[in-house]
Amino acid sequence: MAKQLVRLGTKPSRDGRRFTYVLDYKNEHGKRTRVSLGHADRQKAERQRAQRQRELSMGCVVVEDMRLSELLADSLERTRGQVRESTLLERDIAMRHFLEAVGDIDIRTVKHRHGEAFIQACLDKGNSPATANKKIGCLKRLFQLAVVRGQLDENPFRFVRHIKVPARQVRIYSDPECTRLLEASKEPRRVDAPDWELLVATALCTAMRRGELLNVMWADIDFERLTISVSPKQDTAHTWEWRIKDAERRTLPLTSEVAELLTARRTGQTKLYPYVFISPARYECIQKLREQGQWTVRHGRCPVNNFDRGFRTLLERAQIDTGQFHDLRRTCLSRWLANGLTEYDVMQLAGHSDFSTTHRFYLGVRTDLIDRARAATRAAMGNDFGTRLARAPISGKKVLTRETGSGYSDKTYEKRARSSVG
């Protein structure tokens, strides 16, 4: 006789006058589960018990009831430590906003229409189209993970289309703007502020991200080979944990001028601290926060307080109206492409797995490209194109009007009109 994997039980109502049948068994993870059948029909309940018995004995995955909030908690717990904390935070925010829009419903009742309604709810709430697309992307990933784990049969948001958003204008600093930034960064600063001159120069030289720069250690710099490495950091007594975006280790070039600035910074320190761009005062403050348990992995992404505010002040000093620190990275990548590096080379140095990302977000149209296009147009039109334009008798040209062409049919009039022009 086969072992009975599923037992049939009853669950009384609150008033004790009625009951419903329940199935009692251990699921595929060995966890005791009780599922209410919602009725008191003995024969129907027995058929359902036998069906669940066959599913368990054959190793079939039994899909349990799961609310959206339960799916979120389960997914965050399973992926914690495998993806960046910022990614988990984005998924958490997206799902919570989705819960506000549709309620904490069962995941198997989520349909395509819920995705479209959520996009509209985001726009009505004042979110930009790009923000709404990002939230939908997070939800798509959560539901796809549920499909992989056997919690859903199919992704309900699989065919939900993103809003079409115009390509953003890539902001790159001109050569005069870069010069003014470097000059403005030499002005005196607070003791806990970063060395802006060193940061700007290194960013323009290596196209490193803000978090990558602020987590660079002296051990990452090879002064003989003139290179700087982007590598993850472990949680030790002297360093805090930091993870690379997309887990892409890479080595980047330094110019001799930037290497000299780094050497001067290193020899100018009375005590050598492990981090290059973190001031001694800020490093001591971070160490105290770590001892008090007030430092997390998220803080390591930007270990300098008010970084963006400080860079905006630097832009004002340099008399630059718009821009952000990340535009230094875009400027460097665009320069690399404009000066002979291939698209694949730029993608590898940028740390991107797909060139479409590099092209879409970082490579701007340089002035020299516009100049080359203008020169190509002149060559195609001929060297005497400007002279021919100047000689064209535009003001004295005879123009055929309906009055001068009276007596002709429409077809003949149009033919004579075309022949009179030019």
Image: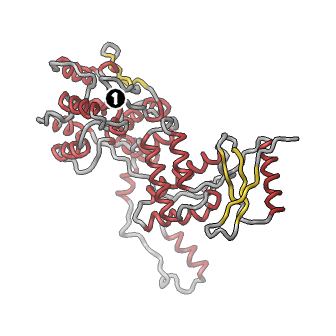
Report which residue position mark 1 lands on: 240
Residue 390, visible in the rendered structure: yes
x, y percent for residue 170: 38, 47
For this orientation, the residue located farthest to the front is: 16
All told, the count of numbered labels is: 1
x, y percent for residue 370: 38, 45
Secondary structure, mark 1, is loop
For this orientation, the residue located farthest to the left is: 188
Q: Is residue 246 above or below residue 72?
A: above
Residue in view at x 32 percent, y 13 percent: 224
For this orientation, the residue located farthest to the bottom is: 407
Position of the N terminus, as image quadrant, is top right
Residue 200, visible in the rendered structure: no
x, y percent for residue 416: 55, 74
Q: Is residue 207 left or right of residue 195?
A: right
Using the image as rendered, state which of residue 219 and residue 149 is in the foreground.
149
Residue in view at x 33 percent, y 35 percent: 300
Q: Amino acid at mark 1?
A: Trp
Give residue 47's quadrant in the image.
Answer: bottom right
Residue in view at x 56 percent, y 76 percent: 414
x, y percent for residue 39: 73, 66
For this orientation, the residue located farthest to the right is: 1
Q: Is residue 409 above or below residue 380?
A: below
Using the image as rendered, state which of residue 422 and residue 103 is in the foreground.
103
Q: How is the image coloured?
A: secondary structure
Give residue 327's quadrant in the image.
Answer: top left
Using the image as rendered, state which of residue 164 and residue 128 is in the foreground.
128
Q: Is residue 51 left or right of residue 102?
A: right
Q: Is residue 244 above or below residue 120?
A: above
Residue in view at x 39 percent, y 25 percent: 234
Q: Residues within 10 Å of mark 1 (few under 14, many from 20)?
A: some
